[in-house]
Amino acid sequence: MTVLLGDKDRFAAEVGEREHSLRRVDLWAAGQWLTCDDNMAFVRQLRSDVVDTVAWLRSGGGSPMPFDDLSPKATHRRLMHRSGADDETEEEYEFRSQFQTLSWGPTTDNVTTHLFRVADRLVLTLQFWREEHLVRHPDHVGRVFVAEVPTEEFVGILEGLAAVLDDSQDPGRP
């Protein structure tokens, strides 16, 4: 049985078959399949990460766009401009890191994301970075995708995802 939560053009999670402690979880944002490199998630870890994200958002987490004069795409590019540079300062890294999200293990480590809170919605920017992905999808080279989702909708999708993942736990395991 497959469960789809959300809208793939904004943000969605699709949960499928289970194999032991792993479960197929496909994440979508801005019409892009984010988990295209690895969609078999370790259930306990992903559920924990998702629950932490829900708590963070419910407590008001999420920074506004840091540059008033830039679009979400331009903001993403500016934040990534010095990412990983040999001379990137700790302050630059810390500033950039406060906007990163969807750090949910191997299923999402093929994409760099930023999350901004704008009034009652979230703006999610994402960019694929793995060379193998970019070779398969040359139209993604240098491209930044943007999804806007009402905060309550995003949180609801994550709560639904956590509930579906909770149902997949081994009954005999704590």
Image (cartoon, rainbow, N blue to C red):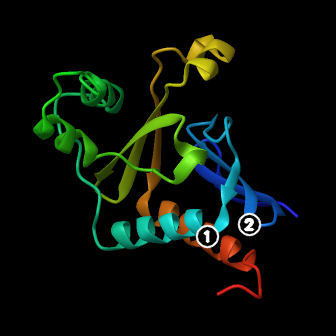
Please tell me which residue is depicted at 19% across the width and 44% down the height of the picture.
94
Q: Give the quadrant of the C terminus.
A: bottom right
171 sits left or right of 102 in the view: right
Residue 125, image x, y percentages: 42, 37
Badge 1: residue crowd in 10 Å (few <14, some 14–19, many ≥20): some
> Total label count?
2
Say which residue appears at 80% left-offset and 66% top-offset.
Answer: 20
Q: Quadrant of residue 134?
A: top right
User: How far is the residue under mark 1 from the one under mark 2?
Assistant: 8 Å
Q: Which amino acid type corresponds to the residue marked 2 in the rendered image?
A: Ser
Q: Amino acid at mark 1?
A: Arg
> Percent position (x, y) of residue 42?
65, 60
Q: Is residue 157 visible?
A: no
Dots 1, 2 in contact, CB < 8 A: yes
Identify the residue at image location x=47%, y=50%: 102
Label 1 element class: helix
Residue 171: mark in rendering: none
Residue at position x 38%, y 52% in the image: 122
- Where residue 6 sits in the image (x, y, percent)? 64, 57
Q: Which residue is mark 2?
A: 21
The answer to whether residue 116 is left or right of residue 88 is: right
| Mark carried by residue 44 | 1
Earlier in the chain: of badge 1 and badge 2, it is 2
- Kindly indicate the quadrant of the structure image that contains residue 165: bottom right
The image quadrant of residue 112 is top left
Relative vertical location of residue 42 with respect to residue 34 in this rendering, above or below = below
From the viewer's side, name the closer residue of 166 and 73: 166
